[in-house]
Image (cartoon, rainbow, N blue to C red):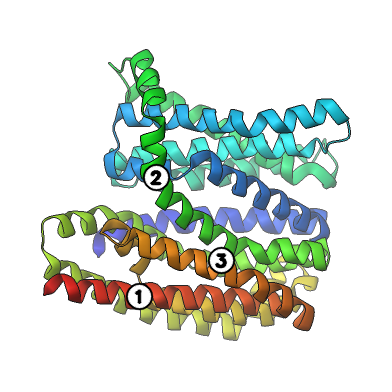
Amino acid sequence: MKKIYFPIVIRIIGLVLAFCFSVAVARFSGANALGEYNYFLIMASFISMFISFGTDNLLLKKGNGGIFISTIVIKFIIFTIVLIPIALFYFTFKSFDTNWFAILFTALLMSLISGGAHYLFKLKFNALGNLYIEPLSCFIKLLLFIVLSFWFNEDNLAVLTYLSSLIIVVLMLYLYIFITKLKGIDFAKEVINSLADFGAIIHYTKPFFVTSLGWFFISATDTFMIAKMLDMKSVGIYNVVFRLVMMTSIIITVINSYFSSEFSDLYENGDIKSLENKFYKISLLLSFLAVGQFLVFFFFGRDILKFWGNVFISGYNLLLILMVGQTINFITGMSAQLLNMTNGKNIVQKTTFTFVLLNIPLNYFFIHLFGLNGAALASAISLGGMNLFYFFSSSRMLQQEKI
């Protein structure tokens, strides 16, 4: 476990910078502008998942220069497929919201950064891969926000800053990859192979895409519902709290990144006993950390929220409710990743889809009944229930494999 301490520190640096950017936007522009910015990110992230279509997971399992080029080609094909109807609608009716072009371009940049980061991880880039990219991106974003605040008004500043930072990071990342990691690659040949294997690659990555899409809907349905049923100020407050809770996921994210390949290797080699021992040890460690995190937010939650401004203190109850779901997420450990790296991809896919469908009506009714607290309750139930099902399914799978 000592090998993952440094990656965790790197992620913490990135999250501190992200924390500072969020506070800067809230202080400079207010809760309403922060809500509009978060809504923009949610929409861009949604489209980005379609553009990637699970190909980043393909890089983790079979990553090489050829596969990397193939994923880029696939992303641009899907991007074009999405862009054409939007462009046709806009040029036909002239009344289409031009923000969609900014959202679509942002989604493409997000997808490219994610792919480059996963490729570097597979190459064991300093054994950390994409962990360096997030702190770099957050630092550039914060610096740009400070500089651009002297020339632009507060309404569009956050979105402009984010888009500018993505462009800079994509250029830096891909210049590094193409100059140092793809020497000797026949790009024309790989592009042709990508087009020929398009259907097979999409078929292989579909389960990863469905799982990621399910996780997205569980984490974003509440934002969509709040935006439609309440207001952007509520979106701003809720997303500050939600992102604060999700900040605690850095440990799970690092552990997933570090042990996914090892889980897959142990399973393929038939060493189920070692796989089981490692899985339960990680779950036990995460359980202790989960309790500690909950207590920190219980006693100091209001003080932490005050960083964004006094209006955000009203999100304290949301914080506790969401932390219940996140605590269950920690206790269940790497259950979903274990299933994905073995033969349980279909279980993850079906479970995720079920809880996605459940999360939509839960949000609708609970927001009607309890407002923002209802959105938090729906998310906690969906997140906690889904992870518990993953845990029991992975435990049962390990027991069956031992027989």
Give the residue at mark 1: 391
Q: Is residue 176 above or below residue 293?
A: above
Q: Residue at x 68, y 82 (%)?
A: 317
Q: Circle 2 is placed at which residue position?
A: 205
> Residue 356's mark?
3
Circle 2: is it few (<14), some (14-19), or many (20+) Cα within 10 Å?
some
- Disc 1 to disc 2, how far (Cα)? 23 Å
Q: Residues within 10 Å of mark 1 (few under 14, many from 20)?
A: many
User: Does any portion of residue 146 appear in the rendered image?
Assistant: no
Q: What amino acid type is highlighted by mark number 1? A: Phe
Res 59 quadrant in image: top left
> Disc 3 versus disc 1: distance between alpha carbons?
17 Å
- What amino acid does circle 3 point to? Val
Residue appearing at x 34%, y 15% in the figure:
189
In this picture, is 89 found above or below 143? above
Front disc: 3 or 1? 3
Residue 143: give x, y in percent of width and height: 64, 41
Whether residue 64 sits left or right of residue 25 in the image: it is left
Q: Quadrant of residue 97 in the image? A: top right
* Left or right for 140, reference 256: right
Left/right of residue 69 with respect to residue 81 in the rendered view: left
Q: Amino acid at mark 2?
A: Thr
Q: Nearer the viewer, residue 79 or 332?
A: 79
The answer to which of marks 1 and 2 sits earlier in the sequence is 2
The foreground one among 276 and 385 is: 385
Under tag 1, what secondary structure?
helix
Residue pictured at 56% horizontal, 66% vertical? 356
Q: On the rendered structure, is 81 left or right of 29?
A: left
